[in-house]
Amino acid sequence: MRILIVRHGDPDYEHDTLTEKGHREAKLLSEKLCKETIDHIYCSPLGRAKDTCAYTARALGKENEVVVYDWLQEFGSPLVWPDGTKRYILWDMLPDFWTREEKMYDHAHWFDQDFYRDANMEKVYRAVTDKLDELLASHGYVRDGRMYKTEAGNTKTLAFFCHFGLEMILLSHLCNISPVVLTHHFAALPTSLTTLYTEERRKGSVTFRCCGFGDVGHLYAGGEEPSFSARFCEVHGNGDRED
């Protein structure tokens, strides 16, 4: 089985839709994906993801086959960082804080810290990953520890149109990596495409392998500069996002 994860196009967060640039990005993505065989399309209920998905669904003639799941909306839980600053999202911690906390690197215990406990972060995380496993089970892949079991593997393609943070949660679960590490070391730019395949090296025992992360080749091919969203400043003081 193959999984495609798409982040929405350049966002207009105020109106929960896409900017003009985001619409151009989504159209270029659809021109790439319309050449693929996609069996199932799943989408976040938020406007920016639905607007991105609509271009590909139309190109594939699958407008009426898109399934919207609430659990695919952007990942978040109210947080108060140790410095007392309120934040809504999992990421954006400064490196000189999170890199010193060994639990941040542990897939099984990253949420086992006071400020994550106060936000019920494990419960929020499991609410997404349990739904993902429920969906994968419906396609024949059942979670078993850090792996999956299958009685009859398949070569279907599932496409998920969602958000940066949510994508990192999916990857965290499928690849058994702390989402703190993923959200701080990897940036999935708008309309980027991440591809995973199942590997069944021994019959019935399955792991997922990421064979492409954050691909924006469709933007370069279409002469569209990738958005900066999800990144921070390359050099401090150059005018881009800092603290």
Image (cartoon, helix red, strand yellow):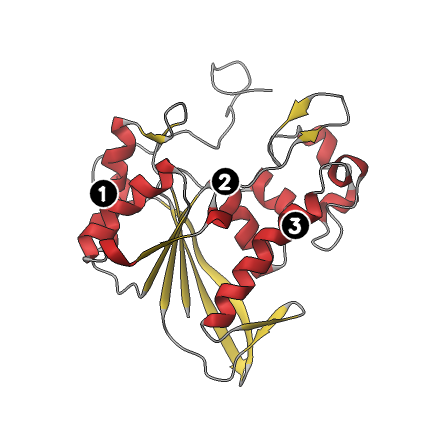
Residue matched to label 2:
74
Can the viewer see residue 123? Answer: yes
Q: Mark 1 or 2 closer to N-term?
A: 1
Give above or below for 215 relative to 147: above
Residue drawn at (56%, 20%) of the image: 242
SS type, badge 2: loop
Find out whether the residues at labels 1 and 3 contact each other: C-beta distance under 8 Å.
no
Residue drawn at (57%, 52%) of the image: 128
Residue drawn at (68%, 49%) of the image: 123
Q: Position of residue 49 (x, y in %)?
A: 37, 41
Q: Nearer the viewer, mark 1 or mark 2?
A: 2
Give above or below for 49 relative to 89: below
Q: Quadrant of the C terminus?
A: top right
Q: Nearer the viewer, residue 228 or 26?
A: 26
Q: Amino acid under label 1?
A: Leu
Disc 3 packing (10 Å; few <14; some 14–19; many ≥20): many
Check residue 28 in the rendering and tell me which mark sits there, or answer none: 1
Q: Position of residue 8 (x, y in %)?
A: 37, 40
Q: Mark 3 or 2 closer to N-term?
A: 2
Q: Nearer the viewer, mark 3 or mark 2?
A: 2
SS type, badge 1: helix
Residue matched to label 3:
178
Q: Mark 1 or 3 closer to N-term?
A: 1
Q: Amino acid under label 3?
A: Ser
Q: Nearer the viewer, residue 216 or 85?
A: 85
Give above or below for 171 relative to 222: below
Q: Position of residue 71 (x, y in %)?
A: 51, 49
Can the viewer see residue 32? Answer: no
